[in-house]
Image (cartoon, rainbow, N blue to C red):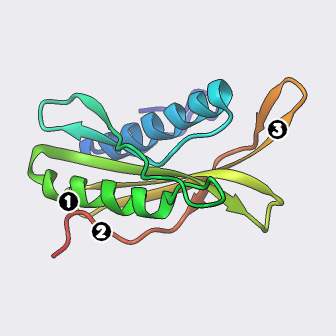
Amino acid sequence: MTDQSTGETLPEESTQDRELRETLGTALGTAQEHIQQNGGFFPFGVTLSNDGEFRIVMIAPGEPDANGDVDAGQMLTDIHHLLRQGRDDFKAVALVSDVTLPDHGSDGIHGAAEHRNGEVRAAIIPYSPTTEGFAFRPMEPDTHEPSIWVD
């Protein structure tokens, strides 16, 4: 593969790299759509099945507390548990959540994708409300440890 702007030969992307990138990209893109349409989202997962299909994994939120808040952390834990249970059916998975980014002074989308071969990619996309909707800043790499295909 050649970089059209520089003419340099680029290393070929492995199948696992592509699957991981596409799974994370699908998850982050879906989260951005939810923010634009609804102003936020509950945690969810995206799976790349062994037959190459992407699927969204969502669970119903629990009962709100006295302040009307839903336990998003518990939702994320429950989705993680479901993904671990079904991991034999997936090539890759991603978990996505709406987070507060104190260093950025904004909220953000956090996504972490894991391939069954052990590779992990994670990223955040800071965002903030505007008069027209939401402004998304460039995606930044983040760190994450494997957690689905580990025992």
* Residue 84 horizontal side relative to residue 59, left or right: left
Question: Which residue carries the number 3 mark?
Answer: 129
Residue 131 to residue 149: above or below: above
Tell which tag, 2 or 1, sits nearer the viewer: 1
Image disc number at residue 147: 2
Q: In which quarter of the image is the C terminus?
A: bottom left
Alpha carbons under labels 2 and 3: distance apart: 32 Å
Q: Can residue 13 be seen from the camera position used here?
A: no
Q: Which of marks 1 and 3 is nearer the N terminus?
A: 1
Q: Quadrant of the N terminus?
A: top left
| Label 1, label 3: how far apart the Cα atoms are | 34 Å
Residue 65, image x, y percentages? 56, 60
> Which residue has dot 1 on it?
84
The image position of residue 41, as x and y in percent, is 56, 40
Residue 17, percent from left and from top:
33, 47
Residue 36 lies, with reference to residue 60, above or below; the image says above
User: Disc 3 marks which amino acid?
Assistant: Pro
In the rendered structure, the answer to whether residue 31 lies left or right of residue 17 reads: right
The answer to whether marks 2 and 1 mark residues whose Cβ atoms lie closer than 8 Å is yes
Q: Is residue 54 left or right of residue 5?
A: left
Q: Label 3 near label 1: C-beta < 8 Å?
A: no
